[in-house]
Amino acid sequence: MQQILNFVIKNKTFLLFLLLFSVALTLAIQSHSYHRSKFINSANGLTGGVYSSVNSVEQYFNLKAENELLSEENKNLREQLFNIETNANSSFIDSTFVTKYKVTLADVYKNSYSATNNYLLLNKGNTDSIKQDFGVMTSNGIVGIIDNTSNGYSRVQSILNIKSRINAKLKSTNHIGSLRWNGTSPIYVQLEDVSQFAPVKVGDTIETGGQSSIFPEGIGIGVIDSFEEDISGNTYTIQVKLFNDMTNIGTVYILENLDRTEINSLENSTNE
């Protein structure tokens, strides 16, 4: 308290000036409409600027929650889209809507892309009903196939893996090939064993072929960058530039074909 009194006594002249200046300014604003309107406009501008800054800060801290909400909405929409397309392509005449695909949202904890056998680690596992041979994709295209799981995590064999084999096709003609990776660039994969009768063109889209129980038909993979005939002359090897930037994968969708067990069981019994 004594320090406050000492401060007032020491600066009494300056404090008296501030008091008288404030009184004079208040009287001037109140007695003249022009001054009053200018003051109000200035105050509103200052207040608006402060509120805008505060709002920007709040929006920044809310971005994560908003992104999670958008990702969840995209997951639901994508699941609906897969099932709508599946029912539309069905050859059975049925009035009931069949749910064939389930989509689960997951975050990437680790992603390798510079080795010859690359993998991703996801934060969903057995406790989330994630199993081996589930497909993984982003909004841009396919990422890989789950090859191992634990209670809380799953490992994805990336399409940038020399062991990877995925059924794919030319979107414009439905000619089928096998999607592989030669271990060279994270930007390109190769579509092999495409018939020589396929009208291959640079810039055409490559997508999943649908001839497996992992990925539905029509998921984007990339575009044709170049192509060449194989030694036999009967097939093409196509250089495919990926839609996905495989060096920057954050949120993914895990695809479960609900008919997978039935399909695999039938295929195994046929092989036997």
Image (cartoon, grey):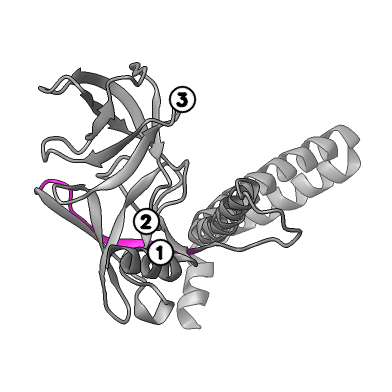
Magenta span includes 105: yes
Q: Residues within 10 Å of mark 3 (few under 14, many from 20)?
A: some
Say which label, 1 or 3, has the lower sequence index. Answer: 1
Which of the 4 image quarters holds residue 253?
Answer: bottom left
Residue 9 percent location from the top left of the image: 52, 68
Report the amino acid beneath label 2.
Val
Identify the secondary structure beneath mark 1.
Answer: strand
**Front: mark 3 or 2:** 3
Q: Which of 259 and 218 is in front in this view?
A: 259
- Residue located beneath label 2 in the image: 136
Give the residues drawn in magenta, as a range: 103-115
The CA span between labels 1 and 3 is 32 Å
Which of the 4 image quarters holds residue 177?
Answer: top left
Q: Magenta region's main secondary structure?
A: strand
Q: Which mark, by number, is residue 172?
A: 3
The CA span between labels 2 and 1 is 9 Å
Report the amino acid beneath label 3.
Ser
Say which label, 3 or 2, has the lower sequence index. Answer: 2
Q: Which mark, by number, is residue 106?
A: 1
**Does residue 185 appear in this view?**
yes
Relative to 247, is 217 on the left or the right?
Answer: right
Report the amino acid beneath label 1.
Ala
**Residue at horizontal 33 percent and vertical 17 percent from the top:** 202
Say which label, 2 or 1, has the lower sequence index. Answer: 1
